[in-house]
Image: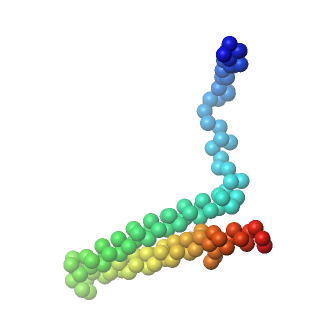
Amino acid sequence: MAEFPAKVSTRTSSPAQGAGASVSALRPDLGFVRSSLGALMLLQLLMIFNVGATVLYITAFITCSAVVDLTSLKGTRPYNQRAAASFFACLVMIAYGASAFFSFQAWRGVGSNAATSQMAGGYA
């Protein structure tokens, strides 16, 4: 224990000139984004976004289509606007749902599971 204080350095460094975050420190690591792990992470974020958007548009479609008949007469301008909004919400919901499905398929891999990918990777 006697030699412990001799091994400890007590020098401190002063901040660099122009204290603050440098621009190079704020740049994203493009090497990580280009790696397979980074691509999977971005794909998973897109998948989560698409699933969230699908859920929001499902609620918009249900809400909008439920109030079309209750709040306006058929053939009037408010009725047509609400019907068009409900139809648009349905189309966007289907598009986001399909995008989430294809993102999940890409994230999972094309018809592979852990056992086949382990065997193919080791002995192919």
Q: Is residue 124 above or below residue 32?
A: below
Q: Locate residue 92: give its quadrant.
A: bottom left
Instruction: Give the percent coordinates (x, y) of residue 121.
Output: 74, 68
Q: Residue at x 54, y 61 (%)?
A: 45
Instruction: Give the percent coordinates (x, y) of residue 37.
Output: 66, 59
* Residue nearer the viewer, 3 or 112: 3
Q: Residue at x 69, y 61 (%)?
A: 36
Q: Is residue 109 visible?
A: no
Q: Is residue 84 above or below residue 44?
A: below
Instruction: Give the percent coordinates (x, y) of residue 14.
Output: 66, 22
Outermost top residue:
2
Q: Locate residue 81: give its quadrant.
A: bottom left
Q: Residue at x 65, y 49 (%)?
A: 28
Q: Is residue 4 above or below residue 120?
A: above
Instruction: Give the percent coordinates (x, y) of residue 112.
Output: 64, 74
Quadrant location of the C terminus? bottom right
Q: Is residue 29 visible?
A: yes
So how many labels did they put on this image?
Answer: 0
Colouring convention used in this rendered image of the protein: rainbow
Outermost right residue:
124
* Residue nearer the viewer, 108 or 59: 108
Quadrant location of the N terminus? top right
Outermost bottom residue:
75
Q: Residue at x 65, y 37 (%)?
A: 22
